[in-house]
């Protein structure tokens, strides 16, 4: 079978698949509402390691209805303006995985797409035409959010966020498993209307010389990350040994080995080059962790000596206190405060923790005694994500507001609190991902009285 015949067969197969879908104003005509932007031909590698070309871009729904069963066909033309190939593609996520056909692109939203190209014979592509198809369905209303939750700043998939100061932050758009220097970085001020593109300040430090100094065979596997403040970086080598180094790759120090059977999911930075490292396999698996400093000094014990958590554990800014979820002494599920430096554990409250794809709790301390006074955390209530606060002095769990999170099991959300602890930047991946800022001052007060006094925490 020639490549051209294979492409025609693929088109026929997709047509059969579309015919088996429920009819929602189904049409085989191009859809003016679906506008394509940022389209480019990209050299990449196929599933069997072979070099291939893909057309990649973003599809924007400019209409008033949603569209499902999205597909894209392309014809390519040579120098003589003769058809020399084509392809068929779908909407994809930020990591390039195809979305299910029942995904619905809502009005005003956009998603990436990818079309692998099949050419009759090797040659140049002078031009191409892309035709999007889809089925119109009624649109879903945007979630109703309180004034404290700023409307979505961007609906693109957010891989990471860093606060620059009390009112400005930067965020990276892209696949969260890719190296940070491959993401599109933007800066946003909470008083502004739109973010603007600006490279990450450490992007230029990722060089072949650094890769050679760190002996990185697979940079993406390395999870290379630079401390937002300081002069140290963290990465893992081919056998998952976690190592810290200076920004130029020098002064390397091994932090932990014996991690070859563990999957590092995230390095979550804290002030003064401290961090918590999260390890787990997939959705529903327990989360293992440890806290340390990029100066290569451990704060907590090794990860298998810390109590595992059902959800992502939260951590205080000094990396000494961790809030983890699991079964309490009463047999109910809930959250406990764990002091990593002496092993002290105090059960705090009962609650059903969400999955490990939800953000970790945020632990805030009382400046007077540096004890944990309140905790902000997300909980799932009857299928709705909501923001709660635990007031430790009052021993009370307070329901504050709904959260704009609708996560599939393979999608992730995380948040970061501003240095003045006045705002939370909430980010999510997935088809309903994006970035929001939560103004804590606009929510009911929580934990503003003196913290409960315990000598350990």
Image (cartoon, helix red, strand yellow):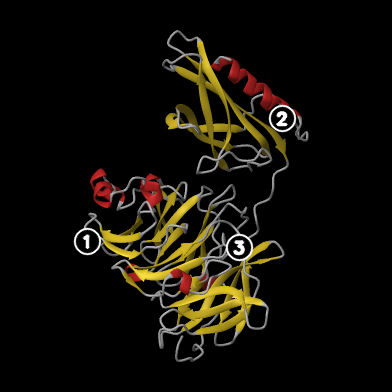
Taking the spot 42% from the left edge, 71% from the top edge, the residue there is: 302
Which residue does the numbered mark 2 point to in the structure image?
18
- Visible in this render: residue 190? no
> Neighbour class for label 1 at 10 Å: few (<14), some, many (≥20)?
few
Q: Earlier in the sequence, mark 2 or mark 1?
A: 2
Q: Badges 2 and 1: C-beta atoms under 8 Å apart?
A: no
Residue 355's mark? 3
User: Helix, strand or loop at disc 1?
Assistant: loop
Q: Quadrant of residue 103?
A: top right
Task: Quote the CA–CA distance across marks 2 and 1.
Answer: 57 Å
At 40% across and 47% down in the image, what residue appears? 220
Q: Residues within 10 Å of mark 2 (few under 14, many from 20)?
A: many
Which residue corresponds to the image point at 49% horizontal and 63% vertical from the top-left? 415
Q: Closer to the observer: label 2 or label 1?
A: 1
Q: Is residue 157 above or below residue 28?
A: below
The percent coordinates of residue 326 (x first, y second) are 60, 73
Left or right of 382, for residue 119: left
| Lower position in the chain sequence, tag 2 or tag 3 | 2
Query: Is the residue 127 above or below the residue 284 in the image?
Result: above
Question: Which x, y percent locates residue 243?
Answer: 32, 60
- Nearest to the eye among marks 2 and 3: give it: 3
Measure how far apart labels 2 and 3 are at the Cα level.
Answer: 33 Å
- Determine which residue is flagged by label 1: 251
């Amino acid at each position: 079978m020639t490549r051209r015949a294979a492409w025609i067969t693929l088109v026929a197969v997709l047509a059969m698949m579309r015919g088996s879908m429920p009819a929602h104003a189904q049409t085989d005509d191009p859809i003016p509402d679906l506008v394509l932007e940022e389209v480019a031909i990209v050299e990449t590698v196929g599933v069997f390691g072979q070099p291939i070309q893909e057309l990649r871009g973003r599809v924007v729904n400019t209409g008033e209805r949603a569209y499902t069963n999205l597909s894209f066909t392309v014809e390519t033309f040579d120098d003589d303006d003769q058809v020399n190939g084509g392809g068929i593609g779908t909407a994809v996520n930020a990591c390039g995985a195809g979305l299910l056909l029942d995904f619905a692109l809502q009005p005003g939203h956009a998603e990436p797409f990818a079309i692998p190209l099949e050419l009759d014979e090797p040659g140049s592509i002078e031009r191409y035409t892309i035709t999007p198809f889809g089925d119109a369905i009624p649109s879903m209303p945007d979630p109703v959010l309180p004034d404290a939750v700023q409307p979505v700043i961007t609906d693109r998939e957010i891989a990471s966020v860093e606060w620059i100061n009390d009112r400005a932050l930067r965020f990276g758009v892209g696949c969260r498993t890719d190296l940070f220097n491959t993401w599109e970085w933007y800066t946003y001020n909470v008083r502004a209307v739109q973010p603007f593109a600006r490279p990450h300040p450490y992007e230029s430090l990722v060089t072949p010389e650094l890769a050679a100094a760190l002996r990185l065979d697979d940079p993406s596997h390395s999870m290379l990350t630079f401390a937002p403040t300081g002069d140290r970086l963290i990465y893992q080598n081919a056998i998952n040994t976690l190592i810290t180094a200076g920004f130029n790759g020098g002064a390397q120090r091994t932090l932990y080995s014996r991690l070859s059977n563990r999957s590092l999911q995230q390095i979550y930075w804290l002030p003064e080059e401290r961090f918590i490292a999260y390890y787990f396999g997939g959705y529903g698996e327990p989360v293992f962790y440890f806290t340390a400093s990029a100066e290569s000094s451990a704060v907590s014990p090794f990860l298998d000596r810390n109590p595992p958590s059902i959800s992502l554990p939260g951590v205080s800014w000094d990396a000494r206190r961790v809030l983890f979820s699991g079964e309490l002494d009463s047999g109910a599920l809930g959250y406990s405060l764990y002091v990593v430096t002496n092993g002290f554990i105090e059960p705090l409250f009962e609650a059903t923790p969400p999955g490990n794809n939800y953000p970790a709790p945020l632990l805030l301390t009382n400046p007077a005694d540096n004890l944990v006074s309140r905790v902000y955390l997300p909980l799932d209530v009857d299928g709705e994500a909501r923001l709660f606060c635990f007031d430790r002095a009052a021993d009370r769990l307070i329901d504050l507001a709904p959260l704009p999170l609708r996560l599939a099991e393979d999608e992730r959300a995380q948040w970061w609190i501003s240095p003045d602890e006045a705002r939370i930047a909430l980010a999510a991946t997935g088809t309903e991902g994006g970035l929001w800022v939560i103004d804590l001052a606009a929510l009911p007060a929580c934990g503003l009285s003196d913290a409960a006094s315990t000598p350990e925490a």
